[in-house]
Amino acid sequence: MASTVHCLFCFEALAAHLEKRKSMTLAEVHKSWAEYSRSVEDDSTGDVPADSSKLSKRLPALRRVTEDSSSSGTSSASNSTLSLGADTPATSTSSIPATGEEEEEEENDGPTPPTESPLFVTWNTVSERGGEHALRGCIGTFEAQELDSGLSSYAVISATQDTRFHAVRAAELPSLAVAVTLLTDFEPAADPADWELGTHGLRISFHHHGRRYGATYLPDVAVEQGWTKEETLVSLMRKAGWVGRKDRWAEIKLDVVRYQGKKVSLEYAEFKRWRDWVDGVEE
């Protein structure tokens, strides 16, 4: 399942790309986040290490992220785009090796995080008034990726190569939020209605008049849009490029693969607080 660390890493990868600097690795972000989380907790209990005292009053807003690293921020409606050449659904049950003593000391009775997975990275702009999210770019792949290289690559690709939008510029970073979805549990649907709203994402393919069509929606899209199953399928067919009559969609034979994946989100302000802490430690 995606985590806050994955979101931080995507922001770090995009920021480094736009600022023309070297990005931290996923393992480095993971270790740094663990250290940062402890420093925030120490600050909240009054037990502040001497070397972090100068930072102690800059970070309280991130406690809510620290307390539940799996929770997502405000969700966004994202018409997710398939990556080219990613035609085979895949999952992995590999585990992440410990990157340091700090990780070995953590007690974690939950499922072991994957080291590779199919994934999507979604960028949204956050309005200054009301905090509404608007899609800014979303690209992913159904082919399993090593998370270090996959997340860093798709963080940049989805921000700069989504043809629906112009490329994200460095000046836009403060207005962005990122969402990461790691995809799991791919299985053929028995029929076009064999899936659950809010649980399953859909990947459809079909032939019409000698042409092949295909498209996908992530699990959160239908619920965010308030669609029924039929409305979701018709919208997905439209997204694929089908222009037939809406009332005749059921006449077309759809191949439907359902999958799962919980989206986790993070806004730039939260990334910036962590990144300022990293820069302060390195000084």
Image (cartoon, grey):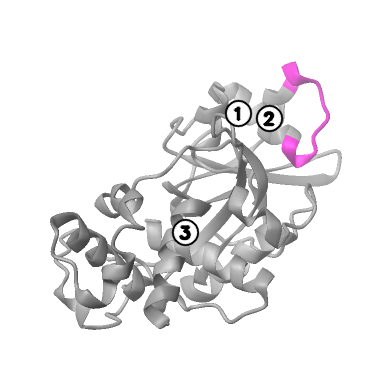
- The first of marks 3 and 2 along the sequence is 2
Q: Amino acid at mark 3?
A: Phe
Residue 161 percent across, percent down from the top left: 75, 60
Q: Amino acid at mark 1?
A: Thr
What residue appears at the point 63 percent right and 46 percent down from the top-left corner? Answer: 80
Residue wearing tag 1: 232
Q: Which of the image's four quarters has the C terminus?
A: bottom left
- Residue ranking furthest to the right: 209
**Where residue 193 sits in the image (x, y, percent)?**
51, 28
Would you say 138 lies left or right of 208 here? left
Mark sitting earlier along the chain (3/1): 1
Does the magenta segment cover residue 265?
Answer: no
Task: Say if residue 91 shows up in the picture.
Answer: no
Q: Which residue is mark 3?
A: 271
> Element under label 2?
helix
Q: Is residue 248 above or below residue 22?
A: above
Magenta stretch bounds: 239-248
Q: Quadrant of residue 127?
A: top right
Q: Position of residue 10 (x, y in %)?
A: 53, 63
Residue that carries the numbered disc 2 in the rendered image? 235
